[in-house]
Image (tube, rainbow, N blue to C red):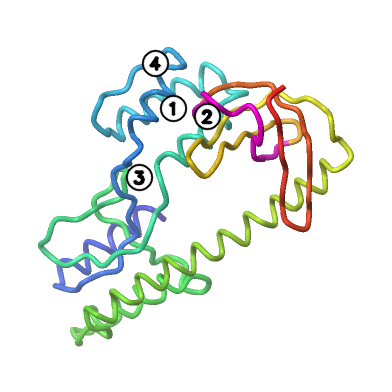
């Protein structure tokens, strides 16, 4: 699938077509990933490097497979979200940092994902030596629309998972769990427990914690209708 998407992107560029790429920019929070690695006794370069990150993750998977899920969730969040962007032929490309690819589009699932359908229409025009089916401004608008709709769908999925977790944990108020900090910002601090697998907000005792820290927490509140799972530092 990844190879097919790369070939498709390069084919459109060779034919002189603008394309709708799937991009993941170089992470702005790389310093936090470096700090996370340091907390585990590992070292990453000061500048973003997907090759170094892959070696670090492979090493941690082998060293501590039971906790690798927690680590990978934290790294994915720190990498940031992907988006759709229009790339022009013979121009510098943003690329996909996590996949370590310069050329990447979504083309293999036109039956369930609108960006793939757009790419298939571009391919059809390129193969028939026809004119592009979209203008540059139309592609820009579609890229923004597809990114926005994906974000909306992700929010719904996240709420469903949070509501399910809140319902599952509703009878366990007061229990303590070993947790892993998966997010820390001005918007709040988030932790993940493993048994059962669930994520919630740390509403008390979060000062001084950063992504990757391990902490014992106590479940203090759940609200399945709003998808709230609240913990306090024990």
Q: Secondary structure at mark 1?
A: helix
Give the number of the disc on residue 42: 4
Q: Which residue is mark 3?
A: 99
Mark 4 vs mark 1: which is more N-terminal?
4
Give the number of the disc on residue 170: none
Q: Secondary structure at mark 2?
A: helix
| Magenta region includes residue 208 | yes
Whole-percent x, y for residue 6 in the image:
30, 57
Position of 93 relative to 58 (above/below):
below
Q: Residue at x 59, y 37 (%)?
A: 190
Rounded to the nearest angstrom, the CA distance separating label 4 from label 1 is 10 Å
Whole-percent x, y for residue 167 in the image:
82, 48
Q: Which marked residue is nearer to the observer: mark 1 or mark 2? A: 2
Q: Which residue is mark 2?
A: 71
Q: Which marked residue is nearer to the observer: mark 4 or mark 1? A: 4
Mark 1 vs mark 2: which is more N-terminal?
1
- Pick the quarter of the image with the C terminus: top right
Q: Relative to residue 98, is residue 110 drawn left or right? A: right
Q: How many discs mark residues in the rendered view?
A: 4
Give the number of the disc on residue 57: 1
Where are the magenta residues, as a range?
197-210
Residue at far right of view = 171
Disc 4 residue crowd, few under 14, some 14–19, many 20+, Cα 10 Å: few
Mark 2 vs mark 4: which is more N-terminal?
4
Rounded to the nearest angstrom, the CA distance separating label 3 from label 2 is 18 Å
Disc 1 residue crowd, few under 14, some 14–19, many 20+, Cα 10 Å: some
Q: Nearer the viewer, residue 55 or 8?
A: 55
Q: Are marks 3 and 1 in contact (CB under 8 Å)?
A: no
């Amino acid at each position: 699938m990844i190879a097919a998407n790369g070939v498709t992107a390069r084919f459109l560029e060779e034919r002189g077509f603008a394309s709708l790429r799937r991009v993941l920019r170089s992470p702005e929070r790389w310093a936090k990933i470096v700090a996370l690695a340091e907390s585990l006794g590992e070292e990453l370069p000061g500048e973003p490097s997907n090759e170094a990150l892959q070696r670090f993750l492979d090493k941690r998977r082998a060293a501590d497979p039971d906790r690798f899920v927690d680590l990978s969730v934290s790294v994915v969040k720190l990498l940031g979200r992907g988006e759709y962007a229009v790339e022009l032929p013979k121009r510098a490309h943003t690329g996909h940092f996590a996949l370590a690819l310069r050329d990447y589009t979504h083309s293999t699932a036109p039956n369930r994902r609108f960006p793939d359908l757009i790419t298939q229409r571009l391919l059809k025009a390129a193969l028939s030596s026809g004119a592009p089916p979209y203008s540059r401004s139309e592609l820009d608008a579609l890229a923004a629309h597809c990114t926005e709709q994906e974000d909306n769908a992700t929010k719904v999925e996240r709420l469903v998972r949070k509501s399910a977790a809140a319902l599952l944990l509703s009878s366990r108020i007061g229990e303590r769990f070993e947790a892993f900090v998966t997010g820390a910002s001005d918007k709040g601090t988030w932790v993940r427990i493993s048994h059962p697998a669930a994520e919630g907000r740390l509403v008390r005792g979060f000062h001084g914690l950063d992504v990757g820290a391990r902490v014992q927490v106590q479940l203090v509140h759940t609200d399945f209708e709003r998808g709230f799972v609240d913990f306090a530092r024990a």
